[in-house]
Image: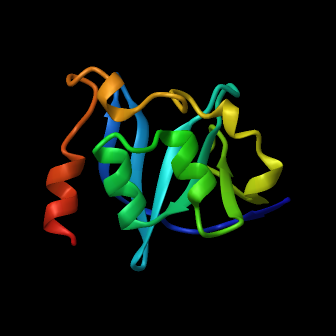
Amino acid sequence: MNNISITFRKKIDLINSEGCIVGLYTINTDLWLCCLTKIRGTKILFSVSKDDLLDYSIGNINLFGLYNNSFSSDAFIIDNDGGHTLTNKFDFDYKNIELGNKFISQVPDSMSSGLLSWYSKNK
């Protein structure tokens, strides 16, 4: 794995509880999700499509589904220092995604934000 420097623009927190658990980011026009992992001090960042985000927002798939549906085989591991390490998404055990087996409807409203509102503005 190689450390690289890349800038992601944060769009919205999808799940937040005293800090972002799942956030939506962009690189140019590409959408990426950044998810807290069960591995202390790390996050995983992977590409997503608008259609899959809609499926997630209406409860058709969970975070594991979003990860597995990612059209790219690339993912980034982000450490505590903010360093991004490029990896093959198949080398990362998706079961380490925090709240990965939860559907958005299973997350308390106080922790989830306006994904549907963002989606309707960005069709």
Q: Looking at the image, which is closer to me, 108 or 25?
A: 108
**Residue lying at 34% horizontally and 34% vertically, measured from the top left:** 104
Q: Is residue 13 left or right of residue 84?
A: left
What colour scheme has been applied to the protein in the rendered image? rainbow
- Residue extending furthest toward the front: 60
**Position of 105 relative to 73 (above/below):** above
Residue 4 at x, y = what percent? 71, 66
Query: Viewer-proximal residue, 73 or 61?
Result: 61
Q: Going 31% across and 56% down the picture, which residue do you hit?
A: 54
Q: In this figure, what is the number of numbered marks?
A: 0
Q: Is residue 56 above or below residue 5?
A: above
Residue 14's spot in the image, x, y percent? Answer: 32, 41
Q: Is residue 96 left or right of residue 16?
A: right
Outermost residue toward the bottom in this view = 28
Question: Which image quadrant for residue 123?
Answer: bottom left
Location of residue 69 in the rendering, given as x and y in whole percent from the top left corner: 58, 58
The residue positioned 28% from the left and 44% from the top of the image is: 58
Query: Camera-side residue: 111 or 59?
Result: 59
Q: Position of residue 62 (x, y in %)?
A: 47, 39
- In the drawing, does residue 27 fall left or right of residue 89? left
Residue name at image x 64 percent, y 69 percent: 72
The quadrant the N terminus occupies is bottom right
Q: Quadrant of residue 64?
A: top right
